[in-house]
Amino acid sequence: MQSIHGLIVAFHIVAGALSLLLFWVPTLTKKGGKIHRQYGDYYIKAMLFTSISGVISSSMALINPLVIYPTIPEGFESAEHFTAFLRGQYTFLLMLSFLVWNNVRHSVAVLEVKKHLSKLRTVSYLWLPVTLLVVASIALYQGITYGITLTCIFAPIALFNAIGILRYVFQKDMVAGKWVTEHIGHIIGSGIGAYTAFFAFGGRTLFEGIPSLQIASWVLPSLIGVPFSIWLSCKYKPKAAIKRRQTERDLIKEHS
């Protein structure tokens, strides 16, 4: 079990590192162009493998923590203390893995179905955001109970992400082209999740003993990614929505 877990984690790290590099090619190239589509497909595949392997490895550690990590490091008072630490750590990683998986899958699905959202109102599609909702709720409870700063920051983000996907799927009226900005937002969201996971574990080692820099490295992907997502979404905002607002402004001017 331990060797299988180690192998999955190794593949997870390699695929994750590749995903972090691939992320910038479709993000910074012309939308809809050949390079954007080609490298976007590479990124999607690499990120799906990364997130699904993260779910599998995290689940294995949560089910049998002391089988995966039989040696208790110094600093832990008991096996129960070490088990609680591992479960807190891997619940967070499981949440991030589900978050990235949701974002990647949703970003592809919205382009495929466009305005035909009824195709997404199925158990086979909705189980993933619902699962994220449950895992993020558990993580938030753990974060508040045990004072885990990182979890308290990102569990609400994961909750809002899951709720946002569900609201999008069940909305009644959609502006033409809204799926473009939905695609952009969730692709960048997947990148934020991946970089957060990288800094959450890599940053802990790089900035060991400097808590302020550790926290800064954790929130840095969101501080960069969220404004970038907003900027791109505004740039590719559906033309129908722009025309509608212009018409509304013209009507206001006529009656003023």
Image (spheres, helix red, strand yellow):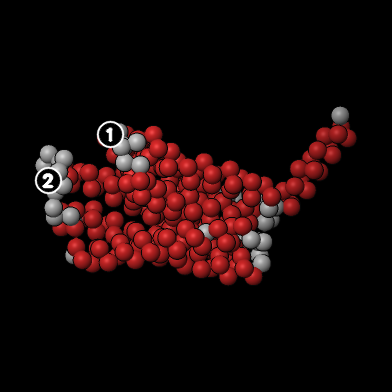
Q: Which residue is mark 2?
A: 79
Can you say which quadrant of the picture contains the N terminus?
Answer: bottom left
Above or below — where is 203 with respect to 109?
above
Residue in front for this viewpoint, 168 or 121: 168
Q: Earlier in the sequence, mark 1 or mark 2?
A: 2
Secondary-structure class at tag 2:
helix
The single residue placed furthest to the right in the displayed view is 254
Nearest the viewer among 37 and 113 is 37
- Residue 221 is situated, as x and y percent measured from the top left of the image, at 48, 46
Residue 201 visible in the shown view? yes
Q: Nearer the viewer, residue 165 or 100?
A: 100
Q: Position of residue 25 (x, y in %)?
A: 57, 61
Please rate how many residues cluster around mark 2, counting C-alpha atoms within 10 Å: few if below 14, some from 14 to 19, many from 20. Answer: some
Disc 1 marks which residue? 145
* Mark 1 to mark 2 CA distance (whole Å): 20 Å
Name the residue type under label 2.
Ala
Left or right: 243 with respect to 104?
right
Amino acid type shown at disc 1: Thr
**CB atoms of marks 1 and 2 within 8 Å:** no
The answer to whether residue 45 is left or right of residue 86 is right
Picture residue at 50% right of the left edge, 51% below the top: 189
Left or right position of 53 against 252: left
Q: Which label was assigned to residue 42?
A: none
Q: Look at discs 1 and 2 and give the one toward the viewer.
A: 2
Q: Residue at x 74, y 52 (%)?
A: 240
